[in-house]
Amino acid sequence: MSTPEFATLTTDDLVTGEAVALDLPAASLGARIASGLIDVIVVFALLLALVLGLVIAALQTDDALLSVAVLAALIVSWVVFPTAIETLTRGKSLGKLALGLRTVRDDAGPISFHHAFVRALVGVVEIYLFFGGPAFFCALISPRGKRLGDYAAGTYVVRDRVRLTLPPPTPMPPPLATWAAQADLASLPTGLALAVRQFLGRIHQIDPASRASIGARLAAQVSEHVAPPPPPGTPPEAFLAAVVAARRDRDSARLARDAELRRRLAARR
């Protein structure tokens, strides 16, 4: 079995407070094309309805007003409608609703009006004026399937119906509970904390030789942030588990104290 790499954090990974890498899965190109076709059909149906309605209303007027009515129909159907839908649904168009997709920011947060407006504005050029060619080729070569509008707005499309499951928390080894309660544990660098969490989560998938080598290397790096060192003879895996569990318990206690303090301050007002 090949040795996993535990210390690599890519730009596509999102990290929680416990240094767990979360990579929201980007939507496939096929799903994006299908949802885009649905959106285009809806937009052109809206455009047709608006043009017919406005043209009929402007028939008794001059040609200039008729041109303004057609331009207004284009703006509403190509820019205003997509922007409003994605803003109100926090990243979902009608096509994305049908395919279970959602537009999110590059940091996986919900998009705002600004993001939706930029995507719709660029979409006028790359989707409607150039018949989707730039959008297709850009999404084809992008690691996240991003079109030009996504690059301009700082967004990408994810599979909204995929549920994220986190592994169970690492338990505290009973023999090290007393030592961990008294030890001075500094915060680990994000990359090192992530590597430790990944190692402990996949420990049973690694061959014994690689397991011992990786565990010893990680323990040596973590020991620089811990004082005093664990009792002599402590296995590296138990040492790492104790540090992770102790840091989690202390962070949970700190957050609970902060929440209680905010509750008391709010009660005094």
Image (cartoon, helix red, strand yellow):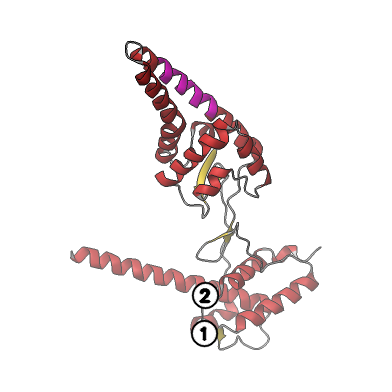
Magenta: main secondary structure equals helix
Which residue is depicted at the point 51% across and 43% down? 103
Q: Position of residue 157 (x, y in %)?
A: 56, 44
- Viewer-side residue, 154 vs 213: 154
The answer to whether any part of residue 112 appears in the image is: no
Q: CA distance from mark 2 to mark 1?
A: 9 Å
Residue 42 in magenta stretch: yes
The residue to which callout 1 is attached is 183
Tell me the quarter of the picture where residue 177 sits: bottom right
CA neighbours of label 1 inside 10 A, class few (<14), some (14 to 19), many (20+): some
Whether 118 is drawn above or below 1: the answer is above
Residue 49 in magenta stretch: yes
Q: Which residues are magenta?
A: 40-52
The answer to whether any part of residue 45 appears in the image is: yes
Amino acid type, residue under disc 2 in the picture: Ala
Q: Position of residue 178 (x, y in %)?
A: 53, 82
Amino acid type, residue under disc 1 in the picture: Ala
Q: Position of residue 143 (x, y in %)?
A: 65, 50
The residue to which callout 2 is attached is 246
CA neighbours of label 2 inside 10 A, class few (<14), some (14 to 19), many (20+): many
Whether 82 is drawn above or below 180: the answer is above
